[in-house]
Image (cartoon, rainbow, N blue to C red):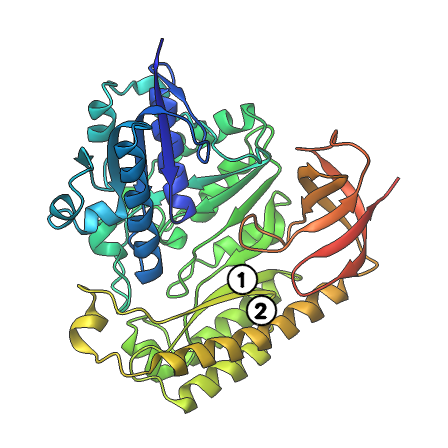
């Protein structure tokens, strides 16, 4: 009988893709035990996150819990890879000796070989989908980042930007479609940088066209776009290609010129406002999602009020935010004093998110009465859990529809929106 392997994945969707590529390689050599199942396993492998303080704490706690499972005999061998172990490769082995092997985040090959698996060229583009929902999948189009934002540790964790060749991504998309995937969520540290290293040009729009030709893929959604030097042909593709959702995740982080300069974002407030105006003009009805940071070193009340005014003006359909976390090794940690008190950071975060709740509620209520095509992700207790082109998985709300059985899961249906709150919508099937 094959040995039993369980992988626990922490952090972002990019880590999920790494795990799914790894599991596709080992599936013939191991019995895969799903994450969350408390059963004895021969090998427990943790894919960790090391981006900010909360994520690091979660990863360390997960390692300590796994070590306890090992002590109790529930786990044979304990291995750790990913961002946390890449970032603290010299410190962690001495702190948690129960771990049998540590690996970084930049190459899965050493992990596979430690598992006794020699990578197969034929399966390098395969994915073992780990989520309960199979209607969508994340497609990681590049690794690493050449940006040097003041607060971000990703460049020295994940290394320099490296695009995945277009033909490899198209083949991976074909294999995902064969597993029932209908939506691709395109991700990277910076999706708009795609192609500069391989093709000497920004090639995201071309990639979108090629992915849209894959049979079975109906929606393509873009995440993690950088505002500086944004490739405007992506907007043209979004406006003209029915498979590219009118949805864009573009983390802006701030709008104050002073803050953007200190953050090393290579744009100013005027550029940011003009970019948002251009996006809404060239892609009518586009849903914009962004992320903001509050409490960066040096942020004054005036800077924060300018940020709130910008949010009122831009009316982002989706917005997330977090407080500044000083990360060792970053420019911010080495050159700025973390001088905004934690209670002020948290108060600013609360104020910002309260404002965004009002905007989100207004957007959702504006859709009541409309008929929308939705993708059915799941069926739970008589309720279909769906999303439209304006909701991205994991980060946005859902559209909930009463339905007596789960037969439409993984398919598209037309619904009428009949209710809304700040996050979710209520709808009914159009017969």
When asked about the image quadrant of residue 166, the answer is top left
Work out whether mark 2 precedes mark 1 in sequence or the reverse, and give the earlier one: 1
Coordinates of residue 241 in the picture (x, y in percent)? 61, 46
Q: Mark 2 falls on what kind of element?
A: loop
Q: Nearer the viewer, residue 234 or 322?
A: 322
When asked about the image quadrant of residue 134, the answer is top right
CB contact under 8 Å: marks 2 and 1:
yes
Q: Which of 356 and 34 is in front in this view?
A: 34
Q: Quadrant of the N terminus?
A: top left
When asked about the image quadrant of residue 255, the answer is bottom left
From the viewer's perspective, is 45 left or right of 301?
Answer: left
Q: Taking 100 as reference, is 10 above or below it?
A: below
Q: Residue at x 62, y 60 (%)?
A: 286
Q: Mark 1 falls on what kind of element?
A: strand
Q: Nearer the viewer, residue 332 or 271?
A: 332
From the viewer's perspective, is 401 left or right of 46?
Answer: right
From the viewer's perspective, is 263 left or right of 245?
Answer: left
Write down the residue under mark 2.
316
Q: Which residue is drawn at 34% across and 71% down?
A: 324
Q: Distance between the residues labelled 2 and 1?
A: 6 Å
Write down the residue under mark 1.
289
From the viewer's perspective, is 413 left or right of 352?
Answer: right
Q: Is residue 163 visible?
A: no
Give the farthest residue toward the front.
72
Q: Which residue is drawn at 37% across and 42% down?
A: 15
Q: Quadrant of the C terminus?
A: top right
């Amino acid at each position: 009988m094959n040995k039993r392997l369980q992988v626990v994945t922490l952090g972002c969707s990019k880590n999920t893709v790494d795990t799914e590529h790894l599991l596709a390689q080992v599936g013939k050599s191991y019995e895969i035990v799903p994450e969350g199942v408390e059963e004895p396993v021969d090998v427990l492998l943790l894919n960790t996150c090391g981006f900010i303080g909360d994520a690091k704490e979660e990863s360390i706690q997960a390692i300590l819990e796994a070590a306890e499972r090992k002590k109790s005999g529930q786990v044979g061998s304990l291995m750790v890879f990913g961002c946390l172990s890449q970032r603290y490769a010299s410190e962690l082995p001495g702190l948690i000796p129960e771990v049998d092997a540590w690996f970084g985040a930049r190459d899965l090959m050493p992990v596979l070989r430690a598992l006794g698996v020699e990578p197969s060229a034929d399966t390098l583009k395969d994915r073992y989908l780990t989520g309960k929902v199979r209607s969508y999948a994340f497609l990681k189009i590049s690794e690493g980042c050449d940006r040097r934002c003041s607060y971000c540790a990703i460049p020295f964790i994940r290394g320099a930007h490296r695009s995945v060749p277009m033909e490899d991504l198209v083949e991976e998309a074909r294999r995902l479609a064969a597993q029932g995937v209908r939506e691709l969520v395109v991700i990277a540290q910076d999706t708009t940088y795609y192609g500069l290293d391989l093709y000497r040009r920004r090639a995201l729009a071309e990639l979108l066209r090629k992915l849209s030709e894959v049979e079975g893929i109906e929606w393509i959604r873009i995440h993690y776009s950088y505002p500086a030097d944004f490739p405007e042909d992506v907007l043209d593709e979004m406006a003209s290609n029915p498979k590219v959702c009118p949805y864009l995740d573009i983390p802006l982080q701030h709008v104050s010129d002073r803050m953007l300069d200190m953050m090393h974002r290579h744009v100013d407030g005027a550029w940011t406002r003009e970019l948002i105006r251009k996006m809404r003009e060239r892609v009518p009805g586009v849903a914009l999602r962004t992320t903001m940071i509050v409490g960066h070193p040096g942020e004054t009340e005036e800077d924060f009020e300018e940020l709130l005014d910008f949010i009122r003006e831009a009316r982002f359909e989706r917005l997330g935010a977090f407080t500044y976390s000083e990360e060792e090794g970053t420019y911010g940690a080495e050159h700025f004093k973390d001088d905004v008190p934690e209670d002020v950071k948290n108060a600013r975060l609360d104020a910002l998110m309260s404002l965004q709740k009002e905007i989100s509620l207004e957007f959702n209520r504006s859709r009541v009465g409309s008929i929308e095509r939705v993708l059915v992700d799941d069926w739970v207790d008589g309720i279909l859990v769906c999303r439209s082109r304006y909701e991205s998985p994991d980060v946005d709300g859902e559209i909930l529809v009463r339905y007596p059985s789960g037969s439409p899961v993984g398919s598209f249906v037309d619904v009428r929106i009949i209710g809304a709150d700040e996050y979710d919508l209520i709808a009914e099937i159009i017969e």
